[in-house]
Image (spheres, grey):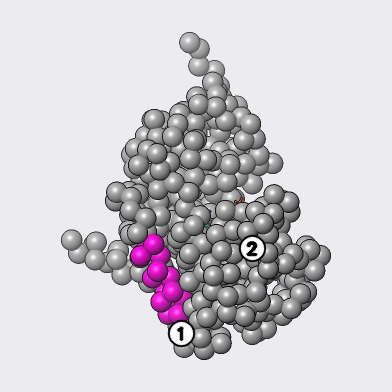
């Protein structure tokens, strides 16, 4: 074996940029993995482990470049810290990204990734995310026990979406209580954008509660899955989505749909949905919601059912227990609205402050032990 000089153009600048991003967002650790044999390129970001091991799914995506992947994993891992903290879980925030087309996935690639995760010694626990299925999790679990979200057939918690939808539904009801004085959604016009796994389960709950539901999706089969089941559900085109008359907008597809364009058109009174990072800019669009008299139910608070579900698996899965823990979202959402009103801040800021306070308080307890 000969060791030659390793070409690392601008490496110092890159390292400096990563460290300064970590400093800015408060990350503890960022780990890059590479395996020549399988072509695996992955990054794990551990944002904060003060409450417990960092838990967050692995996303596989054909990022344009490593910088885009790094940005995504830093942003998503920080969000997980807040989600776990406000939900009262003894978990920190972390996330992993695998860079590449999902078609690159193989048993060898996923097991290699599992070995890398194992090397982190439990500081980071992985789970499913975009383009990583329960089948993929099975391969990862062959190499590490620091994984959750296994299929039900293997004693795992399976698809977390129904639990996520239940939490979103409760967050929406708490919002209704705050705005209309009653948490009944009967007769309320709700537009659900994105009728995938969470959206479909949410529509079921809304119909049962008597809401008038309209949906929008780009996939015909996901629209049909809803309309075949509920004949009263109407369709909204993408062009008119933000202009139709509605009481509640439920973003359950993508992030950043609560942006300046949408807010210049939306005439709803509540925004409550499952998508992560709904506000394009937390400060600007959080304030725009408040100024327009729209009550925004913070996404990381009301979509935590999925995280609760995989956390419950770590303790020995029991769906009843996961649902019971998810029920706390209703009271927690009301508390956030109260604090936002008392402190004259946006609901998003109030939720973030609550999460930060819990991390601070619990860290103190740990320091005295
Ligand atoms: P999914 O992939 O099953 O569903 C997403 C749906 O959105 C699909 O039907 C898709 O066709 C639709 N969609 C995509 N782009 C769209 C667009 N431009 N306009 C309209 N529809 C569009 O995903 P999911 O598991 O249902 O998750 C929905 C959202 O909730 C995601 O943002 C996800 O990150 C978030 N979330 C999910 C969970 C969970 O437990 N599944 C937990 C927390 C957060």
**Residue 51: mark in rendering:** none
- Earlier in the chain: of badge 1 and badge 2, it is 2
**Figure quadrant of residue 139:** top left
Residue 175 place in picture, x, y as percent: 53, 79
**Figure quadrant of residue 93:** bottom left
- Residue drawn at (65%, 70%) of the image: 213
Q: Quadrant of the C terminus?
A: bottom left
Q: Secondary structure at mark 1?
A: helix
- Residue drawn at (49%, 57%) of the image: 162
The mark lying in front, picked from 1 and 2, is: 2
**Horizontal side of residue 246 vs 351, given as left or right:** right
Say if 358 sits above or below 50 in the image. Answer: below
- Residue drawn at (34%, 37%) of the image: 145
For mark 2, does the 10 Å Cα neighbourhood hold few (<14), some (14 to 19), or many (20 or more) residues?
some
Which SS does the magenta portion mostly show?
helix
Ligand 1, seen in the image, is in the quarter at bottom right
- Residue drawn at (66%, 39%) of the image: 62
The extreme right residue here reads 239
Tell me the magenta residue range.
323-336
For mark 1, does the 10 Å Cα neighbourhood hold few (<14), some (14 to 19), or many (20 or more) residues?
some
> Residue 163 in magenta?
no
Q: Secondary structure at mark 2?
A: loop
Q: Which residue is mark 1?
A: 338
Q: Which residue is mark 2?
A: 230
> Residue 333 in magenta?
yes
Q: Is any atom of residue 144 visible in this view?
A: yes
């Amino acid at each position: 074996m000969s060791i030659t000089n390793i070409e690392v153009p601008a490496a110092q600048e890159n390292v400096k940029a990563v460290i300064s991003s970590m400093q800015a967002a408060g990350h503890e650790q960022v780990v890059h993995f590479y395996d020549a044999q399988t072509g695996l390129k992955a990054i794990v970001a551990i944002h904060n482990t003060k409450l417990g091991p960092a838990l967050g799914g692995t996303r596989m995506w054909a990022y344009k470049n490593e910088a885009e992947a790094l940005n995504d994993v830093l942003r998503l891992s920080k969000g997980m810290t807040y989600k776990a903290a406000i939900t009262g879980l003894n978990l920190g925030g972390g996330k992993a990204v695998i860079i590449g087309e999902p078609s690159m996935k193989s048993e060898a690639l996923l097991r290699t990734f599992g070995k890398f995760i194992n090397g982190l010694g439990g500081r980071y626990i992985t789970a499913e995310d975009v383009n990583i299925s329960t089948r993929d999790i099975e391969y990862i679990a062959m190499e590490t026990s620091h994984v959750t979200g296994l299929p039900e057939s293997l004693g795992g918690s399976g698809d977390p979406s129904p639990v996520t939808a239940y939490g979103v539904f409760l967050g929406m009801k708490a919002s209704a209580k705050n705005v209309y004085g009653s948490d009944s959604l009967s007769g309320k016009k709700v537009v659900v954008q994105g009728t995938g796994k969470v959206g479909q389960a949410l529509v079921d709950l809304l119909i049962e509660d008597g809401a008038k539901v309209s949906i929008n999706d780009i996939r015909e089969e996901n629209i049909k899955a809803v309309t075949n089941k509920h004949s009263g559900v109407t369709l909204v085109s993408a062009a008119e989505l933000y202009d139709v008359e509605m009481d509640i907008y439920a973003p359950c597809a993508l992030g950043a749909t609560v942006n300046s364009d949408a807010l210049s058109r939306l005439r709803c009174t509540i925004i409550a949905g499952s998508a992560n990072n709904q506000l394009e800019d937390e400060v600007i669009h959080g304030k725009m919601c408040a100024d327009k008299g729209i009550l925004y139910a913070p996404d990381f608070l009301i979509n935590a059912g999925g995280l609760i579900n995989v956390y419950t698996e770590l303790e020995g899965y029991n769906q009843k227990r996961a649902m019971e823990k998810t029920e706390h979202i209703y009271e927690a959402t009301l508390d956030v609205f109260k604090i936002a009103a008392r402190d004259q801040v946006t609901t998003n800021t109030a939720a973030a402050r609550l999460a930060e306070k819990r991390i601070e308080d619990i860290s103190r307890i740990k320091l005295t032990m």
